[in-house]
Amino acid sequence: MAPLPPPAAAEASSMPATPRTTNTLLLLLLIVIACLSPGSSSSNRGVIRMKIVEEPNSFGLNNGLVAQATRLKAKVKPSRVTGPRHLFRLAGKCFSHTSGSYKYDLCPFHNVTQHEQSLRWNAYSGILGIWHEWEIVNNTFIAMVMRNGDNCGSNSRQAKVTFRCGTQNALLGVEEPRTCEYAVNFTSPLVCHPHSMLVYPTLPQSLREEWDRIEQDLYDEIITQQGYEKQLRTAIFRKSGYVLSADADATAADGPEDQERVFNTLDSCNEEYRTLQEEVRRLKALLQQHGISPNHTATAAPPASRAEHRLAGGGLPATSNGAPRGLQQLKGDVGER
């Protein structure tokens, strides 16, 4: 009679092999083979090199949204930065606002974008408008006009950015009063001064003088109100780059040479300051060569120009009903003629 197997062996032979125990045995077998392989030296024997592959878990994340945001393609380049100088500091910055299932990003002087906050694989993300020009009414910058956004049927999406006084720079919200036309509300302490959005003070001297001439022609009834507004748009606003012609692309040229320079860094500002100091010293030396003191002042001031009256709100000639026009024009009201 054959001897009976030991109890432990009998139990082991009767237990079914589970996947976990099988994997453990295979791992132990691989370790033994690696340790006993002829190519392994005594210094690295027993050390197994393992490569860990990290696979990102994208379950439940809206990765399609991020991918779409990076693939946004603009039709045209933004126009150059123009308008009130104190608003130039907004260039290069972006402001966000989330409303419902959409996130809006406003980058002044650049573009407005919309991103759908959804777990759908094809969540919408697109451009609502690209910085184009200013909307000007009654000598006042009314809104930033953003055009050439993503296609919307046979047209392109467009947006207008209006400003209101606030304690901080912030995007308040975005509305869609008409299909594919968006109203963007932005708050900023930069627009709290009552004269902060006037057009006339931002112009170079040559265009101010041209505006004064057009203003005088209107006062003398040489041109009509309609002709006055047309000349302002063509002779002033377009030359300054504040508005573009109907067929002008948003990639318009650089604009007038006498446009004031914008400094994006402290180094560029310091460099320009040193250049101006050298120019001042050169001019002082030139005055001394001609026997003129640099501190020489005229004994009598010339009469104030119409431009100075407009800036100071002083006594411009009265209108037909006898009301002074200076202060009204300063606030952007052309007054009665």
Image (tube, helix red, strand yellow):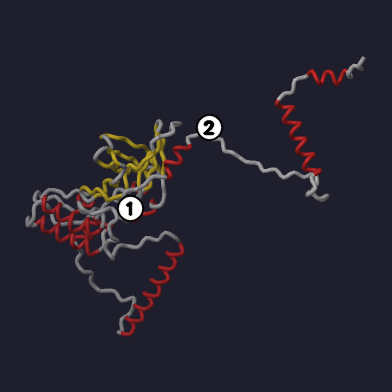
What is the crowding at mark 2: few (fewer than 14 residues within 10 Å), some, or many (at least 20)?
few
In the foreground, 332 or 37: 37
Q: Secondary structure at mark 1?
A: loop
Inter-mark Cα distance, 2 to 1: 36 Å
Proximity of marks 2 and 1: CB atoms separated by less than 8 Å: no
In the image, what residue type sits under mark 1?
Lys
> In which quarter of the view is residue 119 placed?
top left
In the foreground, 315 or 111: 111
For residue 167, say whether it is visible.
Answer: no
Q: Residue at x 79, y 18 (%)?
A: 14
Q: Secondary structure at mark 2?
A: loop
> In which quarter of the view is residue 106 placed?
top left
> In which quarter of the view is residue 261 placed?
bottom left
Q: Position of residue 206 (x, y in %)?
A: 22, 64
Q: Residue at x 77, y 43 (%)?
A: 34
In the foreground, 52 or 153: 52
Dot label at residue 251: none
Position of 31 with respect to 77 (left or right) is right
Q: Position of residue 21 (x, y in %)?
A: 74, 27
Q: Residue beneath label 2, please?
A: 59
Position of 269 with respect to 304 (left or right) is right
Q: Residue beneath label 1, please?
A: 77
What is the crowding at mark 1: few (fewer than 14 residues within 10 Å), some, or many (at least 20)?
some
In the foreground, 142 or 43: 43
Outermost residue to the left:
222
- In front: mark 2 or mark 1? 2
Q: Position of residue 64 (x, y in %)?
A: 45, 37
In the image, what residue type sits under mark 2?
Phe
